[in-house]
Amino acid sequence: MTPPTVRSSAAQETREPGGSATRAWTMRLLVLGIVLSALNLRPAITSLGALLEEVRDGLGMSGSVAGLLTSVPPLCFAVFGVMAPRLARRFGAGAVVCAGMAAIATGLAIRPYAGGTAGFLAASALALMGIAVSNVLMPVIVKHWFPDRVGSMTGLYSMALALGTALAAAVTVPLTDTLGGSWQSGLALWAGLAVAAVLPWLPFVRGRAAAPGAGDRGGDRPAPAGDAGAETPAPGTESAREETSAPASTEPAREEAPRLRITRSRTAWALAVFFGLQATAAYITMGWMAQIFRDAGVPAGTAGLLLAVTMVMGVPLAFVIPRLATRLPHQGPIVLALGVCGLAGYAGLYLAPAAGAWAWALLLGVANCAFPLALTMVGMRARTGPGVAQLSAFAQSTGYLISIPGPLLVGVLYQHSGGWGLPIALMSALMIPQMAVGVLAGRDRTVEDEAGR
C-alpha cells in the first residue's frame, strides 16, 4: 500500500486533535509546544553549573563525584536517546515529548530535596531522560508537521534552545538570592518551566500526532545547512543531528540503498571522534566554567552571566557557520579557527581568569560552535539519505561515549591538584586532537566511497 504524502498525512493527523477546521489553532499550539520544549532542553544542566559549589557543599560532594555529575548528561543522551524512535512508534511522538517534559519537571522538582547524592543523581537522570527523548523527536516533529518550513522552524527551535541554556546560566543565581539563598529553591524553580511545556502537547497524546515515519521524507536527503545550527544542543542542540539520525530508526527501508560498513570509513571515524571531543569541551564548559570563574574571585552572579554569554554565542554563529561550511570544499580552516579560539580561551582562563573573564567567555563561546559545524559535516560527508542517517547515528553514539569521561576527569584533577592548572591543561590538550580529526573529517569525500560494498 502506498504510504500517504507528507501533506495528506499531516492533514489527517491534524484532524485528530480537534478537526480540520482547527488546523490553524493546532499549528500554533505545535509551535508553542516546540518552543517551550526547546527552552527546557538545557536548564537542567546549566542551572546546576551556576550553583555547583552550593550543591557540593550542601550534599557533601567531593570533586570526583561532582565530576561524575557533570558526566551524567552525555551518558543519559547516549543511553536514553536511542529509545526515542521505538517509543514514538508505539505511543506517538507527541505523547513521548509530553512525557519527556513531565519527566523533566518531575526530576527537577525532586532532585534538590532527594536527601543525598544518590537521590540527586537519580532525579537528575530522570530529567535528563526526558531531555534525551525530546532531543531526538522534536526535530522529527518539525520535519513532519512543517515540511515546507524546516529551516525556519529549526532556526526557531535552535534559538529557543540556546536562549534556555543561557537564561538558566544567567538568572539562576539572582533568582536563588531572591528566594532566600536556598540552592534547593534555585534549582527547583526550573521545574515550573517544564510544567508549562507539558500543556501544549496534551491534545496530541491520544491521537499519536506527529508520529515519525508517517510521510516524513527527512531521511531522503541531508538537512539544509541552516538546519544544522540547532544546539547548541545540542541537543540544542543537538537538533540537526537528531533530525538526520531519527529517521534511520523509524524508516530504514524507505530508500533502496545498501547498508554501509560504516566502521570501514576513515571519515566516519574522524567525524565520530571530532563530535566526541567537541561534546567533551561543551559539557566541561557547562559543568565547570562558572566554578573556574568563582574560584578566581568572580562573584557567583557574574560567573553565571559569563557562562550565559558563552552559551548564547551559539545563537548567531549556529546560522553563520553551517552556511559558510557548505560554501567551502574543505571545512578544515573553520575547524582550525574554532580550535584557535578555544586554545586562546583556555590560555586566558589559566593566566588571568578574572581580569579577562568576558573575553575568555566569548572565545570559548566561539569554540563551542564546533557543534553545528560537526552537524553540517555529517550532512556533507554522505550522498544519500540512508548514508546521512547511518553516519549521523554512528558519529553521535560513538561521540557521546567518548565525551563521558572528560567532565569526570576534570573533577578528579581539580580535587587532587587543588586548583585549575591541570584541568585547564587537559582541556587544552584535548583541543589539539579535536583540530586534527576535524581537518580529516572536513575533507571533500563521502562515506559511500569509503564504506560501500
Image (cartoon, helix red, strand yellow):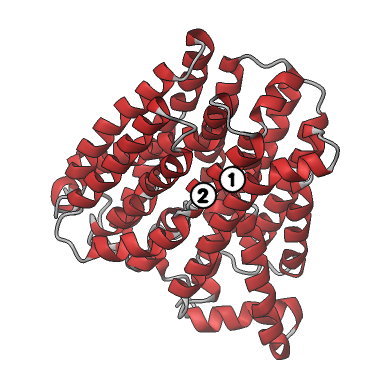
Quick check: 360 above or below 53? below
Secondary structure beneath dot 1 equals: helix
Quick check: 452 above or below 140? above
At label 1, which amino acid type do we have?
Leu
- Find out whether the residues at labels 2 and 1 contact each other: C-beta distance under 8 Å: yes
Q: Position of residue 81 (x, y in %)?
A: 53, 44
Q: Position of residue 56 (x, y in %)?
A: 68, 21
Q: Position of residue 273 (x, y in %)?
A: 30, 36
Secondary structure beneath dot 2 equals: helix
Label 1 sits on residue: 305
Farthest-out residue, bottom:
21
Number of residues whose C-alpha sits closer than 10 Å to that of mark 1, classed few (under 14), some (14–19) or many (20 or more): many
Task: Identify the residue at horizontal 43%, vertical 62% (top origin).
Answer: 316
Q: Quadrant of residue 184?
A: top right
Task: Identify the residue at horizontal 58%, vertical 16% (top origin).
Answer: 63
Q: Is residue 261 visible?
A: no
Label 2 sits on residue: 309
Asked whether, in this view, residue 298 is left or right of residue 250, the answer is right
Quick check: 406 above or below 95? above
Task: Identify the residue at horizontal 84%, vertical 42% (top origin).
Answer: 179
Asked whether, in this view, residue 72 is left or right of residue 243, the answer is right
Task: Identify the residue at horizontal 34%, vertical 43% (top origin).
Answer: 395
| Near-viewer residue (383 or 372) | 372
**Separation of disc 2 and disc 1 at Cα?**
6 Å
Number of residues whose C-alpha sits closer than 10 Å to that of mark 2, classed few (under 14), some (14–19) or many (20 or more): many
| Near-viewer residue (251 or 123) | 123
